Image (cartoon, helix red, strand yellow):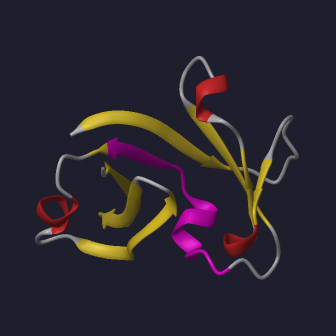
Amino acid sequence: MKFHHIGIPTKEKKANEIYLEGGKLYVTDIDASEHKIEWLRFEDGSPMPEALQTTAHVAYVVDSMEEALKGREILMEPFSPAEGLNVAFVLEDGAPIEYMEYVK
């Protein structure tokens, strides 16, 4: 596993937010942050899990999503938010952790 970013929920509008309609949330560009912070601002009625809406998460790139998920408490099953990328969320002691797998 390799660290990728930290996601922090916020109620404040941030510059250059990107709207993700399916999740009813706004996110910032990780690459625009020196410290790899992704700000997440959720709309009312967002289908995203409460743990993601209220608790910061750490994201890691994994070589194999299947291997990374073994024995873990899954918060969100794997999905593909962008071409060539699979993402899943697990819980570790109640805290959300994001796994990212780049696929060809």
Left or right, residue 85 beside residue 43: left
- Give 101 or 70, whichever is nearer the viewer: 101
Quarter assignment of residue 74: bottom left
Q: Position of residue 21 (x, y in %)?
A: 75, 69
Q: Position of residue 72 (x, y in %)?
A: 19, 70
Q: Residue furthest front?
A: 104
Which quarter of the figure is the N terminus placed in? top left
Q: Position of residue 101 (x, y in %)?
A: 31, 51
Task: Count up the numbered dots.
Answer: 0
- Give 26 or 12, whichever is nearer the viewer: 26
Left or right, residue 25 beside residue 70: right
* Residue at position x 69%, y 74% in the image: 22
* Residue at position x 74%, y 63% in the image: 25
Q: Does the magenta-highlighted stretch encompass residue 30? A: no
Q: Which residues are magenta?
A: 47-60
Residue 3 higher or lower than 54, as above or below: above
* Residue at position x 31%, y 42% in the image: 61
Left or right, residue 97 beside residue 69: right
Residue 84 higher or lower than 45, as above or below: above
Quarter assignment of residue 60: top left
